[in-house]
Image (cartoon, grey):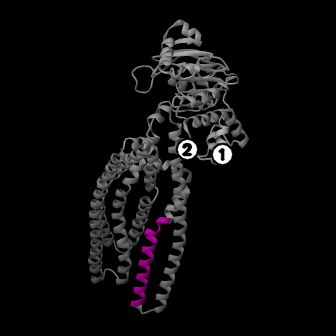
Amino acid sequence: MFKKLTAGDNKYFFKIFRFARPYAFRYALSQLMYSAQGFVFPFAMALLSGNIMAAVVAENSDMVVSAIINFAIIVGVFFVLLGAGIYNNIITIEKIMMNIKRELFRKFTKSGIEDAAVAHSGEGIAAINTDADTARGVFGQPLTEVVNCALGIIGSSIVIFAVDWRLGTGAFAVGIISFIMQHRFTKPLAKIGKDRLEVNADAVKTASNIFSGAMVMRAYNMQSRALIMFDTDNKRLKLLDFKRGFIEMWRGVFTTLQGWMSLAVTFALGGWLVATDRLEFYMLMIVLGMFETLVSSIGRIGRTYADLQVPIAGAKRVFSILDKGTYGQETDISEEKLPTGFNLSIQNLDFAYRGATSNALSGISLNINENEMVAFVGESGSGKSTLLRSIIGMYERSDFGMELGGASFNEMSAKSWRRKFAYVDQSCKLFDMSVGENISMGLRGNASNALITAAAKRAAAHDFIVGLDGGYDAPCGEKGATLSGGQKQRIAIARALLKGSQVLVFDEATAALDADSENYVMETINSLRSDHTILITTHNLKSIIAADRIVVMDKGQIAEIGKHDELIERKGLYYELFTQDRGTEQDRETIPLP
């Protein structure tokens, strides 16, 4: 029986309760207090009715007063406990939900970079908001109903069978029929609930795509097409809601029939017992309320089981993310070996992306000295960016043969390894917060205004920042929408400098900039060479002529290494790339280098 209850999607009902373990006692107590209404109030009403009827028969007014006082005491105590139970229930569930959402968020942030790259932002938003909130029902009203019904069944059964076993048998028979009728709606409602969550997630993804691509949407006059895409998801949701409404209609009809059936059986069987002197009339009045409680409680269990299918579907989607095995998931190492310097050594590094049939990098061996500027060049797809991301620890692999200052990549956690590197790419992601806050993101903990300003000055960003409306408190907007490309890059460089890492990594940091902005950024980068190791990739080869070494990449392998003049003299791949670059960009002035 238990295996059947925990089979299929039902297992997620029990699985999600692991988040309730820290609050197990408080949660269980609040559920009992909250759910006691399923028995206490009907019992108090039945007791009051029976006592009053007995007093009427005995023509004793004192018994009436006594019955009312007893009823008031029971109801008063009950409502105090009920209020405390409701409050504790709400607070406990909110704490549980906070832990679930935190675990989901942590899962996304701890995932390997390959998982993060392919995951849609809409999936994360839907999981943390819609799916988690839907799973809330596992801890909330449906479960409360189950406990409520269980208490109602136990309490009313004791009372009814104590009065007359025939009434108890009749109540159970009607209740089981009601349960079977309600249970018939479980599967279709579960499927609709599951489908609705999936369609809602698709709708969130569609909206996310439209909002993030606002510029392209307007440039190509795609507003009507975007509206059609959004309407398509909404129509699917509407159709599912219509189906659910149709099923709920019939479920309501059967619930009403169950209530009528309960009353009919109670009066028929109870009336016969009274008429044949097998039962006192006032006892029938007591049983009448408890009979309805027993029958409805058994039937409501079937209804509640159906209602639980939607929260269970939400829990399943939550665990589809939490249980997902990540490729390159970040791990922690208890005893780390920390580097004693910043010489970087790479030996026979191979790397393949998930699902790829061939390596993106093959046999990479390279030594980079402290305070050396090394440029990585090559055609698109040659492996430049993949190599840089591998170097800074974005892809965690046990077979990466890398050492930094004598410490192996495998002897350090990904976090510790990446603390030694500061990374700036062409997208230079800025957050929807102030300029100062974006710069301070480079430092763990709070950064003083003095440190932020110093980093901005070193990145040649201070002058334009103070000219903004609000200065360092000026908002950047989503993705830095209020700033130019060059301004965003210099803020990103300031953030990298504030991190305090010895090795600065620039991955196509000037690719999206115009010539003037590129000049500013490259001047800034070159000013950092005296006290930083700099690794840079670029398609504008003129900008890295003065690099200490140039690594030429081709099809995931190192084709050439040397200084600019040496590589030009060899007339190999670098010579071809440089000639092409100079031929297609003759109007560009050579970027000043020290």
Query: Tag 2: residue type?
Result: Thr
Q: What is the spatial separation of the Cα atoms under label 2 and label 1, in whole angstroms?
A: 13 Å
Tag count in the figure? 2
The percent position of residue 479, horizontal first and vertical second, equals 53, 41
Residue 379 position (above or below residue 517): above
Q: Which of disc 1 and disc 2 is earlier in sequence? A: 1
Q: Residue at x 53, y 39 (%)?
A: 109
Residue labelled with disc 1: 471
Residue 173 is a magenta residue = no
Residue labelled with disc 2: 482
Residue 456 position (above or below residue 341): below
Query: Tag 1: residue type?
Result: Gly
Q: Residue at x 33, y 80 (%)?
A: 279
Say which of 174 and 306 sits in front: 306
Say which of 97 and 146 sits in front: 97
The magenta span reads 34-56
Task: For mark 2, give the secondary structure.
Answer: loop
Q: Is residue 123 visible?
A: no
Neighbourhood count class around disc 1 (C-alpha, 10 Å): few under 14, some 14–19, many 20 upward:
some
Residue 418 position (above or below residue 304): above
The percent position of residue 31, horizontal first and vertical second, equals 49, 61
Q: Residue at x 57, y 22 (%)?
A: 589
The percent position of residue 328, horizontal first and vertical second, equals 50, 30
- Left or right of residue 311, residue 330 in this image: right
Q: Is residue 411 visible?
A: yes
- Left or right of residue 175, residue 88 in this image: right
The percent position of residue 98, horizontal first and vertical second, equals 53, 51
Neighbourhood count class around disc 2 (C-alpha, 10 Å): few under 14, some 14–19, many 20 upward:
few
Q: Residue at x 69, y 32 (%)?
A: 458
